[in-house]
Image: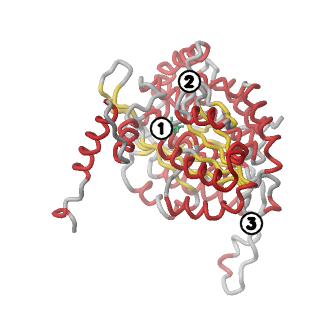
Amino acid sequence: MSESQIKLYYKNATAELIGTEHGITPAQLKALAEETSPLISQLNNERKDGKTPYRDLPYSKEISQKVKGLVAELKDRCENLVVLGIGGSALGNIALQTALNPYMHNLDDTQHSSPRLFVFDNIDPVQFGLFLDWVSDRLDKTIFNVISKSGQTTETLSQFMIIRQLLLDKLGPEGLQNHVIITTDLTQGPLCKIAADAALRCLEVPQGVGGRFSVLSAVGLFGAAMCGVDIDSLLAGARDMDSRVSCEDFYKNPAAVNAAINYHFYNRGKKISVMMSYSFRLKDLADWYRQLWAESLGKAKDLTGDEVHIGPTPIKALGATDQHSQVQLYLEGPNDKLFTFLQVNNFDKKLKIGPAPDSAPELAFLAGKDLGTLLNNEKKATEYALLHCKRPCLTVVFDEVNAYTVGQFIYLYEVTTSFAGALFKIDTYNQPAVKFVREAIPALEGKSGCDEMGRKCEELAQQIQSLTKIDGDFLV
Ligand code: PA5
């Protein structure tokens, strides 16, 4: 088993580095430890009581065996795996692919021996239509994994209805059965009914595991395993982190410390949380984190029902790219952000910069240097500048990027989110406001009928149309 680890470094968020106005003082850290410590046993107990089933996913032999069995059956006849899903049903798959497969995985057959992966988490007709043009001639070598926990998400179901017809037209009912895997809640929802009716193969989204906490279930594991990711190592990394984030000593528990520091800064006006990866491979984990943090912590009411309108705004950034796009704002704009860098100590590749041209001897300082070292120096330069401007910074340090450390990262941030929710005293696992948009879409798409639901849809559609109608007086 890999020994590599990730660690959270927080000195650069303290008063020692950025002063008492913006940094955490030892007394504040002590107060945070006192406030957070009881939550460690609270979370551990909630887990024992089965209230946070995502915590046990890395231990489920049943899930990994089912996934591996299906992969063994399908892999040899699959050149393209197409995931249809959105939000928590897609972002983990994208993050695992970017982090753990070669950059040219989809394009260069010499870099992989497993299927290409395409994840469609949008319904843009141009993007999806052009892809369908490409895949239509390759259906016999393509598997579609339709992922929706609720089984009723309009975006995913409309994509599914397109490919269902395509498969039926081109390959018949048997083609549908052979080329579609449904991942859903097996107890409810239209997708589950469709799968049963057409005898489609299914994987389960476990009960009580929300989309954004589901990447270590079949939701993320199937796509990852199909495309060559070592899911045993991924899960082992998550289990390793489990022992660290269950530790009752606040100062040794990276999730508790991470959540407490984020909570502290939010309460002191730093309401924006920027995750800036200095590794291309980790950039989509920042995207995955963005959803986890936003949907879990953005809430109108606390647990007592009081209106609080809580929620740090997560932003993703990529170094060095965004040094030339965002960093001017980060340094001189409002001091309202906490920064979390993702740093990799050992990149898989050493890449030497070539010699300086004779015409530009001033570039000699770069000649022969390693590109990964330069990238890490760019991180240091940005961090130095932020500290100079008294902006608090955290760093998640990866020894290296592999399935084991990525498993650790995922689990660290899931449990950090649980701690943050407990500190903010909100329900971390629901997303009540999303229903406003979810309900509006069928209404606008013309869902109607004589029953109560149908009448409600018609009324809602009228309301929305009058609210969103373009008023020419305001067009310039
Ligand atoms: O985290 C969540 O619960 C959401 O982001 C869902 O994953 C997203 O809305 C998609 O829902 P579903 O998986 O039911 O299609």
Task: Quadrant for residue 397, please give it.
Answer: top right
Residue 295 visible in the snapshot? yes
406 and 329: which is toward the camera = 406
Disc 1 residue lies near ligand 1 with CB under 8 A? no
Cα–Cα span, label 2 and label 3: 50 Å
Q: Amino acid at mark 3?
A: Lys
Which one is earlier in the sequence, the residue at label 2 or at label 3?
A: 2
In percent of width and height, residue 423 lies at 45, 24
In percent of width and height, residue 29 lies at 49, 27
Q: Is residue 345 shown left or right of residue 253? A: right
In percent of width and height, residue 100 lies at 72, 48
* Residue underneath mark 2: 208
Residue 233 visible in the snapshot? no
Which one is earlier in the sequence, the residue at label 1 or at label 3?
A: 1
Disc 3 residue lies near ligand 1 with CB under 8 A? no
Which element type, helix, strand or loop, lies under badge 1? helix
Q: Amino acid at mark 2?
A: Gly
Q: Residues within 10 Å of mark 3 (few under 14, many from 20)?
A: some
Q: Which mark is residue 15?
A: 1
Query: In what quadrant of the picture does the C terminus appear?
Result: bottom left
Q: Amino acid at mark 1?
A: Ala
Q: Which mark is residue 369?
A: 3
What residue is drawn where x is 47% and y is 20%? Answer: 35
What residue is drawn where x is 79% and y is 52%? Answer: 114
Which element type, helix, strand or loop, lies under badge 3? loop
Query: Which of the two marks, 2 or 1, is nearer to us in this view?
Result: 2
Cα–Cα span, label 2 and label 1: 40 Å
Q: Are marks 2 and 1 in contact (CB under 8 Å)?
A: no
In percent of width and height, residue 275 lies at 53, 46
Q: Residues within 10 Å of mark 1 (few under 14, many from 20)?
A: some
In this view, 242 is above or below 279: above
Query: In what quadrant of the picture does the N terminus appear?
Result: top right
